[in-house]
């Protein structure tokens, strides 16, 4: 399995080795030892999610309060999505940075987002099926969103799609509004929390 760190610190792309034969293909889309060696700590699995989206569906930008936040390890089992990570950590040297990875059934990549990062994706095909491994369970009182169409974010969204958003995402605050309202995670809190994970190795 190959990996690279994205332009947003704390986010990584993982590309598995595939073993095709006459029956199909086999791959390991998550390996705990490889993940821990890359991220510097193990991934505690508390919940596994699956979402199926029509072409043009835009989900996010979602994030959770830190601590404990919610780290995610994400792949696309069917179809294709452009998966997007946003640095929304107040005080981060890369605050506002955005990076993206194409998750599809060709390279079968996965992306990891550490606690405190914003996450979004847009479905490029009907029936795009996204699988998430999550470090903490869903807790609605700790979950937040930023409007993915916020011009300040300037997400590099594909052309030629009619975007479909939930009411929650469409009415979510902009990045500036979330910052002014004290809703965003702080870099120091995120770094301290992840350092505690490192110590558990």
Image (cartoon, rainbow, N blue to C red):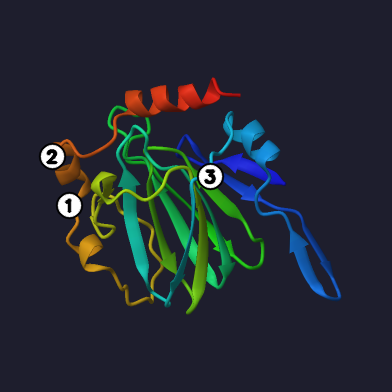
Determine the secondary structure under disc 1: loop
Q: Looking at the rendered structure, which numbered label has been put on residue 45? A: 3
Q: From the viewer's perspective, is the residue at label 2 or at label 3 nearer?
A: 3
Mark 2 lies on residue? 181
Q: How many marks?
A: 3
> Front-most of 34 and 47?
47
Q: Are the residues tagged 1 and 2 within 8 Å (C-beta)?
A: yes
- Residue 200 horizontal side relative to residue 115, left or right: right
Point out the image quarter for the C terminus: top right
Mark 1 lies on residue? 173
| Disc 1: CA contacts within 10 A as few (<14), some (14-19) or many (>=20) | some
Q: Quadrant of residue 86?
A: top left
| Disc 2: CA contacts within 10 A as few (<14), some (14-19) or many (>=20) | few
- Residue 63 horizontal side relative to residue 37, left or right: left
* Residue 13 spot, x, y in % from top left: 58, 47
Determine the secondary structure under disc 2: loop
In this view, 165 is above or below 6: below
User: Nearer the N terminus, badge 1 or badge 3?
Assistant: 3
> Which residue lies at the image location 38% right of the left edge and 76% below the top edge?
160
User: Nearer the N terminus, badge 2 or badge 3?
Assistant: 3
In this view, 191 is above or below 6: above
């Amino acid at each position: 399995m190959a990996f690279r760190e994205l332009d947003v610190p704390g986010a990584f792309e993982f590309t598995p080795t595939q073993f095709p034969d006459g029956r199909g293909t086999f791959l390991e889309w998550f390996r705990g030892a490889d993940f821990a060696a890359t991220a510097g700590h193990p991934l505690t699995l508390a919940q596994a999610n699956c979402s199926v989206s029509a072409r043009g569906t835009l989900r996010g930008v979602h994030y959770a309060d830190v601590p404990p936040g919610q780290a995610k390890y994400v792949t696309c089992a069917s179809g294709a999505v452009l998966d997007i990570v946003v640095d929304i950590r107040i005080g981060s040297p890369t605050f506002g940075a955005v990076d993206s990875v194409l998750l599809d059934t060709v390279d079968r990549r996965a992306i990891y987002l550490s606690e405190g990062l914003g996450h979004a994706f847009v479905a490029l095909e009907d029936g795009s099926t996204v699988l998430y491994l999550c470090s903490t369970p869903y807790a609605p009182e700790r979950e937040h969103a930023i409007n993915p169409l916020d011009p300040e974010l300037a997400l590099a969204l594909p052309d030629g799609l009619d975007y479909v958003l939930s009411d929650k995402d469409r009415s979510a605050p902009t990045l500036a509004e979330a910052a002014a309202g004290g809703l965003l995670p702080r870099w120091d809190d995120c770094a301290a929390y992840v350092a505690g994970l490192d110590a558990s190795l």
